Amino acid sequence: MHPLMQALQPVLAQRNQSLVALRRDLHRHAELSFKETRTADVIAQRLRAAGLDVRTGIAGTGVVGVLHGDRPGRVVAYRADIDALPLDEVADVPFRSVHGGVMHACGHDGHVAIAVTMAELLAERRRELPGAVVFLFQPAEEVFGGAEQMIAAGVLDDPRVEAVLGLHLINQFPVGAVVARPGATMASADFFDIEVLGKGGHGAFPHTSIDPITVAAHIVVGLQDLVSREIAPQDAAVMTIGQISAGTKHNIIPEVAHMGGSIRAFTPAIRDQLVERLSAFASRIAQAYRAEATVRIQGDGTPPVVNDVDVTERVRRGAIELFGPAAVLDGMPIMGSDDMSLFLRERPGCYFWVGAGVPGKAMNPHHHPGFEIDERSLDVGLRLALNAVLDALHP
């Protein structure tokens, strides 16, 4: 354990109440992607009060706080995502979101609370701190927009960051559990739209029309074969159609059908293969029914989250030292995605998971209107993040 981490042990328990209070305040005032103005203001005020060099307005609503230690060392970035989701909260809690249709349903409020508290604790020990820590409070993770813009704004270059760390609270694991996996740990994500153009007509005379709904149905079924018959069984990939819309009335064959979906994979090669094959596959199925299908890929998506082997091993060793070997799980890669991947593509690092589930209780999943966490996970996350950052600051 880093000596500074040992010195902080008595202080951590004293900060737990304010840590939870900050998380609840952010939860109560949840804000959507690129609209996190209050959240950014709270972060910036706390960081300035702690004596960090603060920049705001990065990627619109992002905040960067730089803490320079008084001792020589490396430069390490710590990233926390700050946005909420468009959901009506149903959890019966006193800190329920005051904004209808907006809710922290993925733990980002906890991520911010941990990062701000860590910045404050380290700032109090600046004289003993080696190197510098760059705290990245990133907007718009939920729409994969914030990381790319922050990187383009140079947040990893001034000062030049040598490693990037971050955590995600995850209620699929009980509080006290830690998962840090080397290599690919979360999938890439690409979103697409398909427009099927047929020929409208009367439902009683289908032979005079070209039914785009029938074509869309065959495309949906066919896409499953695109994965099961073109991707090797030992490799993982998912293609999901999450939206279908067409028609206005029971007995009218519409002109157009629209679909929206996603592609997820753990390697760039499989990701590229599926993106490339999608357009030709949908188009040729449509041609078989005398229709047309046009595929549009939305933006650049986000690549897989790939953890550096050495950095991840150091995080795991620290977790074992802090919480014992039984707390550190191997886990499995998940098909969820996160644009932390873009930071990790630029610099080596580790994105680790901290269990936030209530032991023995069936938890609503992330992105559910009844999502909740065991708030004891905040203390676990703070301790692990502190130790990981301090360890990474040493050459």
Image (spheres, grey):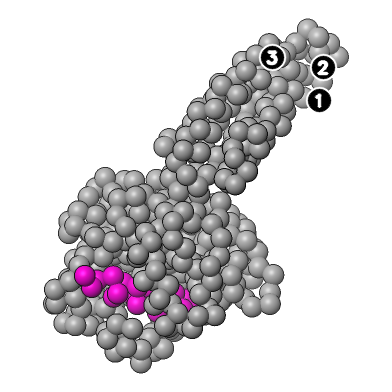
Q: Nearer the viewer, mark 2 or mark 3?
A: 3
Task: Where is residue 71? Give x, y as percent.
Answer: 14, 77
Q: Which three-letter amino acid code belongs to the residue tagged 3?
A: Ala
N-terminal label among 1 and 3 = 1
Label 1 – label 3 distance at C-alpha? 25 Å
Q: Which residue is located at x 39 percent, y 69 percent?
A: 313
Q: Quadrant of the N terminus?
A: bottom left
Q: Is residue 388 magenta?
A: yes
**Residues at badges 2 and 1 in contact (C-beta under 8 Å)?**
yes
Q: Nearer the viewer, mark 1 or mark 3?
A: 3
Q: Which three-letter amino acid code belongs to the residue tagged 1?
A: His
What is the number of the mark on residue 250?
Answer: 1
Q: Residues within 10 Å of mark 2 (few under 14, many from 20)?
A: some
**Residues at badges 1 and 3 in contact (C-beta under 8 Å)?**
no
Label 2 – label 1 distance at C-alpha? 8 Å
Q: Which residue is located at x 66 percent, y 24 percent?
A: 257
Instruction: Please give the residue where the numbered disc 3 appears in the rendered image.
Output: 288
Magenta region? 377-395
Instruction: Please give the residue where the numbered disc 2 appears in the rendered image.
Output: 203
Q: Which residue is located at x 81 percent, y 25 percent?
A: 250
Tell me: 24 left or right of 73.
Answer: right
Task: Where is residue 91? Give x, y as percent.
Answer: 63, 67
Residue nearest the observer in this picture, 219 or 368: 219
